[in-house]
Amino acid sequence: MYADYGKRLMDITLALVLALPALVLCLVCIVLIRREDAAPAVFRQVRVGYNRRPFTLYKLRTMSTGTGDRASHEISTAQITRIGRLLRRTKLDELPQLVNVLRGDMSFVGPRPCLPSQDVLVAERDKRGVYEVRPGITGPAQLAGIDMSTPVELAEADARYAAQIRFMDDLRYIVRTATGGGSGDAVRSA
């Protein structure tokens, strides 16, 4: 029951509660990003979503201009801006994804959405039925330190989550992420 209806209700409720504080924080972050670099502060990227439909994901920009459309584990720390390091560490770069949650592209908890070009991960997730759930801002694989550089291991972890979606687990993942748990996708040392 929760996986079918309650999860979406929780997503909408939580996103609406967080919308105003997130907007204020985003505006502050945008000013800081723009002071470091004149490029757009909000980053848009096409990702693979629910039922393999592509959608546009929104984040605060943490990488240098010209980094390209690549996954985090494919770039080096030299390509992360000074303010970007802070935004990634505090997870403030994820705040614009509240728009994705409200639009129904994403959930608070689920498999992290990948790029369409990550063929191995897309295929591994597809054969395990991972695309039958909405991607998430956070998820158990991310909190366990499993990132997109290990596509088979990630797809297996995502499939375990998709098979047993429970309210208390989702709540625990949200709290762990908000209190600093998880590391996101690994970035190579410069």
Image (cartoon, rainbow, N blue to C red):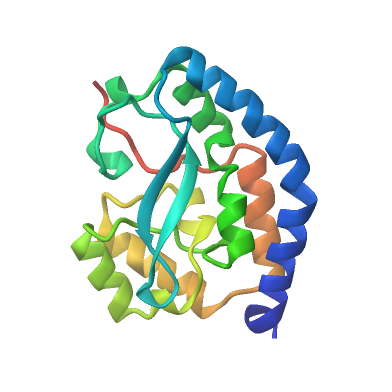
- Regarding residue 137, the answer to whether it shows in the image is yes
- Name the residue at the bottom extreme: 1
Quadrant of the frame with the N terminus? bottom right
Q: Nearer the viewer, residue 11 or 40?
A: 40
Q: Position of residue 185 (x, y in %)?
A: 37, 43
- Residue drawn at (72%, 76%), measured in percent from left and top? 6
Q: Position of residue 64 (x, y in %)?
A: 33, 24
- Residue drawn at (27%, 67%), measured in percent from left and top? 122
Q: Is residue 162 above or below residue 26?
A: below
Q: Is residue 120 above or below residue 1?
A: above
Question: Is 176 left or right of 69, judged from the image as shown?
Answer: right
Question: Is 16 left or right of 104, judged from the image as shown?
Answer: right
Q: Is residue 140 above or below residue 27?
A: below
Question: Is 31 left or right of 66, judged from the image as shown?
Answer: right
- Residue drawn at (62%, 55%), measured in percent from left and top? 173
Quadrant assignment, res 21? top right
- Residue drawn at (61%, 45%), measured in percent from left and top? 177
Quadrant assignment, res 126? bottom left
Q: Position of residue 186 (x, y in %)?
A: 34, 38
Quadrant assignment, res 38? top left
Q: Nearer the viewer, residue 181 or 13?
A: 13
Q: Position of residue 176 (x, y in %)?
A: 64, 47
Quadrant of the frame with the C terminus? top left
Question: Number of marks in the image?
Answer: 0
- Regarding residue 139, the answer to whether it shows in the image is no
- Name the residue at the top extreme: 35
